Amino acid sequence: MEFIAKKDDLLGQLALVQGIVERKTTMPILSHLLLVADKEGLQLVATDLEVGFRTRCEASISQPGEVTVPARKIFDVVRSLPGGEIQFRRSGDHDLGIVCEQTKFTLRGLPASDFPSLPETALKDPVQLPAARLREMIARVIFAVTVDDPVYSLNGALFSVEGKTLTLVATDGHRLAYASCELEIKPLKKGIRQVVHRKTLAELLKLLADLDDEDQISCGEVDNHILFRVDRAVLTSRSLEKSFPAYEKVLPDFDDHQIGLDRELLAAALKRVSLLSSERSRAVRFDLTRDRLEITSNSPDLGEASEVLTVDYKGNGVAIGFNARYVIDFTESLSCSRVRMILKDSNTQGLFLPEEELDSEYRYVVMPMQLRGEEAD
């Protein structure tokens, strides 16, 4: 195996795979990157068994072959080299020699035959998704994916394409983020419904970041995997074999007490007031009365904080407790200037949504925290 690649071309592709490889694993091969030199150039492959990634880099191939190398080390080595062309040559059974000007490295690898196989990348009847729309929808739900809750340990979000409708839903049992939009495609005869790993969504966001608004990506199912093709990169994710909660039952249909709020003012007030909230619960109290919304926190150890926002509201008063971090996450997922909060009572989930029309329907539900006297707990 022997090839030459330009530093800038290779470094960009090596950066993409760093989020996939496992740095702390009982399987050393999962911390490695598979390099495959073939007639089409250089292919880079990484996997953690749940999420797989393939990408290509332009290279001049003198001798085809494959080798595995530590993903982090080859990234550090290539990044440290001066610009220009870098020569690579496999030496022995598993080592990779690297030469750039007067600098030489030899990286110890593992047998390429030990590297896990990934599903096929060919898609039959792939769905074309608008890159910009998908990027925005993922950003609006990914923060609500559960991480360590034993009850809602999905570690992923629902990804659904039914007919012409794309829907993403994430929940951790305390909040739920829902985004849906209509696609400009022919209605699908067979839809896609997968619980997609949070890591997959995060890596997909990185791939989508550099695409233009008019760009499209391909999506489809292969065996028990979902596959996303973004330019020359292919991201695959094993389906999480758990049923997704019946989220439709959580989406409220009431409009009892609702107000419009400046998004940035709300976020700033929450960040200030929550400074004196419990570090564990981040609980703050919302008191909505005529023409005002007061946000307060009360901690026996830290003290008290409050801030009043002027609002257009003429209804009856209502008080409710929320985790401030949950509401801040909502405000930071949007770029619009105003948002709407809809409440029913102190014991019912609150609904947050953008006040301005977006490319996708977006609703965010937050479960209430119990109020005890002057304290949200």
Image (spheres, rainbow, N blue to C red):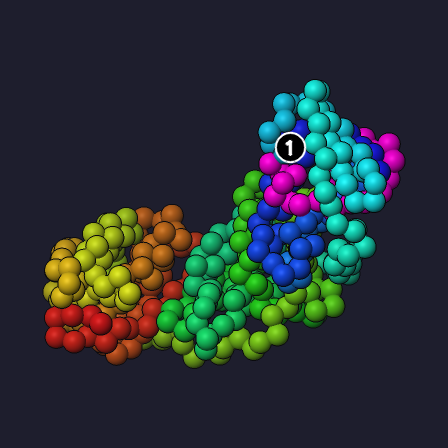
Q: Nearer the viewer, residue 293 or 303?
A: 303
Q: Which residue is mark 1?
A: 78
Q: Give the side of residue 199 with respect to residue 257, left or right.
A: right
Furthest residue toward top? 102
Residue 26 falls in which quadrant of the image?
bottom right
Query: At 64% from the left edge and 32% from the top edge, which residue is drawn?
Result: 78
Query: At 72% from the left edge and 42% from the top edge, which residue is drawn?
Result: 108
Which element carries disc 1, helix, strand or loop? helix
Q: Is residue 359 visible?
A: no
Q: How many marks?
A: 1
Q: Nearer the viewer, residue 254 or 42?
A: 42
Q: Nearer the viewer, residue 330 or 57?
A: 57
Label 1 packing within 10 angstroms: few (<14), some (14-19), many (20+): many
Q: Nearer the viewer, residue 288 or 4?
A: 4
Query: At 40% from the left edge and 76% from the top edge, which residue is drawn?
Result: 250
- Residue 214: x and y, percent? 59, 43
- Residue 117: x and y, percent? 76, 59
Residue 60 falls in which quadrant of the image?
top right
User: Is residue 58 one of those drawn in magenta?
Assistant: yes
Relative to 367, say whether 198 is above or below: above
Query: At 61% from the left edge and 74% from the top edge, which residue is drawn?
Result: 241
Q: Is residue 1 visible?
A: yes
- Name the kind of residue labelled 1 in the image: Val
Q: Give the side of residue 205 with respect to residue 219, left or right.
A: left
> Where the C terminus falls, by quadrant?
bottom left
> Where the N terminus falls, by quadrant?
top right
User: Is residue 3 one of those drawn in magenta?
Assistant: no
- Residue 45: x and y, percent? 71, 49
The magenta-colored residue range is 55-76
- Residue 10: x and y, percent? 68, 34
